[in-house]
Amino acid sequence: MTAALTTDKERALELEAVNLTLSWDGGQDVVVRDINLSANAGEVICLVGRSGCGKTTILHAISGLLVPLEGHILLSGEDVTGVPGKISYMLQKDLLIPSKRIIDNVSLPLVIGGLSRKEAREQAAPFFERFGLEGTEQKWPSQLSGGMRQRAAFLRTYLMGNEAVLLDEPFSALDAITRVDIRAWFCRMVRGLHLASVVITHDVDEAVSMADHVYVLVGTPRAGIPTTVAGEVVVPRSAREGVDDFSLTSEYLACKRRVVELLGA
């Protein structure tokens, strides 16, 4: 296995969930009904909804860990429904192995793919500067701040070699200041590397500040009301460009207001 994602050329990548209907346990009790969403290369999309509405279940289906009752997952037109390993998945916790140095933590997907530790280290090393991790190669996870650990976790996810990535509340454990910085960094990396990304968050401000598209989910599966998409809010990328603080603009406030309205639908 090699680290295939080494160029920044534009790709025609598109990740799509088409008419997804899901249950939690493979049974007939529907948790999520008729979900449609898409992310192109270089885009961040956010799923926002109340706790227990099935956001993580949707990511499990997109990643191939859960087979839907109905619907399909398409990656650049290829049907990858129920096929794990096609789409990378980064969990809320960084899951860095305490007994491994950072270089060995991030290069683990390459070792699993068949490279020797030496070869994996050599392939991973050039990415450290780009991911803002230079100088951490020989450190232990306990020596890194929360933000740096998340960068390392994202580099490890990237080195899985897939062009679409899923993230389940990746910044929720960070302090507020670090969270703002790491969100901005993450968005730059997604756009620079031309990845298609789907991010779960409970935070409306986080969603609007990061996403190109915010999908608002409503439903109460535990009460027998399947979750559906109440609406999609498009956040114009042009509104962010050249703006010192996008969160103070009228465009930001309009998008936030619409997300809040849809959550109350």
Image (tube, helix red, strand yellow):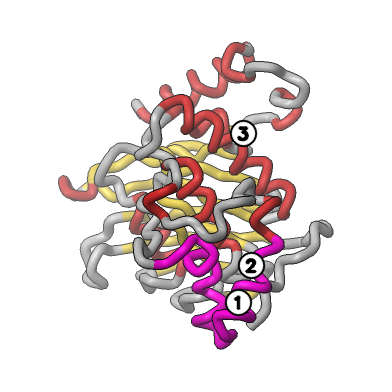
Magenta stretch holds residue 116 = yes
Q: Which residue is mark 3?
A: 234
Q: Nearer the viewer, mark 3 or mark 2?
A: 2
Q: Amino acid at mark 1?
A: Ala
Q: Nearer the viewer, residue 247 or 118?
A: 118
- The amino acid beneath tag 2 is Ala
SS type, badge 2: helix
> Which of the two labelled residues, at mark 1 and mark 3, occupies the earlier sequence position?
1
Mark 2: give few (<14), some (14-19) or many (20+) Cα within 10 Å: many
Q: Quadrant of residue 213?
A: top right
Residue 124 is marked as 2
Circle 1 residue: 120
Q: Residue at x 71, y 32 (%)?
A: 237
**Highlighted range, magenta:** 100-126
Q: Nearer the viewer, mark 1 or mark 3?
A: 1
Residue 192 placement, left or right of 29:
right
Q: Nearer the viewer, residue 81 or 90?
A: 90
Secondary element under disc 3, as helix, strand or loop, is: strand
Q: Residue at x 63, y 67 (%)?
A: 124
Q: Is residue 132 visible?
A: yes
- Give the number of the disc on residue 143: none
